[in-house]
Image (cartoon, grey):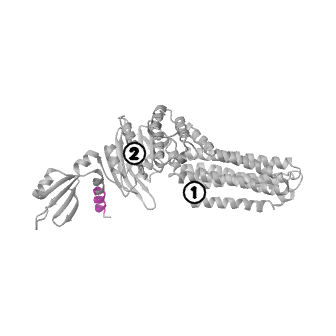
Amino acid sequence: MNIVTRKLLAKELYVNRGFLVMGSAAGIISTLIATLGKTGLNIGSLMWLTTIIAIGVMLGIYGIMHERKEHTLEFVLSLPVSIAEYVRAKVLGLWICFFIVWLASSVAALLLIFLKDSIPDGIAAYTVLLCFFMLANYGVVLCGMLEARSEAASTGIIVVTNMGISVFMFTVAPLAGIQNTMWGSTPVWNATFWTVLGCELAVLLITFTLPFLLAARRRDFF
Amino acid sequence: MDNKHIEMRGVRKNFQFFTLDNLSLDLEAGEVMGFVGPNGAGKSTTLRLAMGMIAPDAGEIRLMGHAIPAAQAAAKRDVGYVSADMRLLPQATFGWHMDFMKSIYPEWDGSYAATLVKRFNLRPEQNARSLSLGERVKAVLLLALARRPRLLILDEPTTGLDPVARHEVISEFMDVLQDDGRSILFSSHNTVDVERISDRITFIDRGRIVESSNKEDFLDRWRRIHVQLPAGASLPELPNIVGRVIDGQFVTLTTDRYCEGLRALIGPHVREVQRMNLEEIFVANVMHHREVRGS
């Protein structure tokens, strides 16, 4: 990675510093709220989910869509950088930004599960799957928005991926291998868990790799 | 050694409703080219092609001797690009942008940057989001100039600026030109600015180069000839006439190849021969080429 790519990557962390701090704080605070009884758990869980989804969407909107719309992309592309190097810096930068918030929120949620007696540890397996789903979902958002040529297409990607979270919750939670162990006292890492996680990791790998194969080879980036 | 800063040969770029066709352009080191065309003529597209932001469908582009878009990273190291539309990162201050450029370009001239900050009355601590149009253009220009590029590509940099800001910006270009090895490609539809700094002018219209020549050559060749014909008289067949307006016995001819021989051909009916400014030449040239192309 050359110096300009490194500087562009650092630029992503700098310009998104507000999202990083606020997102990580909101993720941790929402898990603290979840410790405050049943209502707190409901509100905290909702806040936790919303935080991770919103940060992913915000990074896509401000990091990709607004860069094009507000012509800051023109400034970035005037630097001594190729399209492939720009895409590399952009993808890595936005992934790191999201990963920090995701990691803080996920670790906080798992700590809550294992430290709070009133929450069964069995739900940890489902929580891990949910966390990785949101990571893969962000991969789809990022990959789609880098490919999208219009604001409408980008908005469509955001809507579809947001709906994907609900679809995940309604389809994975009722799976026998998940449902039967979810409320147990210990987490069960069974075949269902590994299959779902495998699918999520596959999506993650594909959506992480695709921009380097597609967007980086685009002839017109403006 | 190849002394061309920009070379474009037979470049073609198709969009849904616009085609840039068979575009060829050369910019020598030390040359200032005014790239003039009406709105939507293809000026910005041409400059973005030169910068590798978009790739041509056909033809060849070289920037600072490097093939574009393949070697754009190496080529752009010595190129400063400024566009009227360009925005700085809204989440960062102007000072952050200067530090950012300094970290990328080893040739960043800090004392020149400080001089320009004062001259342009910019405040490094100001957030890029809060810069006015004039401040924004001057800020972007400063970031391009302070790294002392050998080539400046300027896409309508004075558009929307008030006369004072425009004067400041143009004066800075004139300073750049003190160095013979540096060149400027300056796109605008403001012919006054172009006439002031350019030594070569290229006209573009509807995606095609209309004409490219030295500024002095344009100003020397183009004339308006006012003729008053006596009743019943008519003009002889005249060469190199690109425009003709008849109002009763008064005829105004526009020529792109004026010579005393032409005046002699018209005879004693010539009332006045007028020099044309660049704007008049630009309009007459574009209208003539549209007529020739049958649109």
**Could you tell me which residue is drawn at 14 percent across and 50 percent down?**
B260
The residue under label 2 is: B164
Mark 2, other Cα within 10 Å: few <14 / some 14–19 / many ≥20: few
The span shown in magenta is: B284-293
Q: Quadrant of residue B251?
A: bottom left
Could one spot residue B64 in this view of the protein? no
Residue B178 position within the rendered picture, expressed as x and y whole percent measured from the top left: 35, 35
Q: Chain of mark 2?
A: B
Secondary structure, mark 1, is: loop
Kind of residue indicated by mark 2? Val
Real-space Cα separation, disc 1 to disc 2, in angstroms: 41 Å
Between residues B121 and A123, which one lies in front from this camera angle?
A: B121
On whether residue A109 falls in the magenta region, the answer is no
Mark 1, other Cα within 10 Å: few <14 / some 14–19 / many ≥20: some
Q: Chain of mark 1?
A: A
Residue A100 vs B249, above or below: the answer is above
**Callouts 1 and 2 close, C-beta under 8 Å:** no
Kind of residue indicated by mark 1? Ala
Secondary structure, mark 2, is: helix
Q: Main secondary structure of the magenta part?
A: helix
In the rendered structure, the answer to whether residue A158 lies left or right of residue B228 reads right
The residue under label 1 is: A148
Residue sitting farthest toward the top? B111
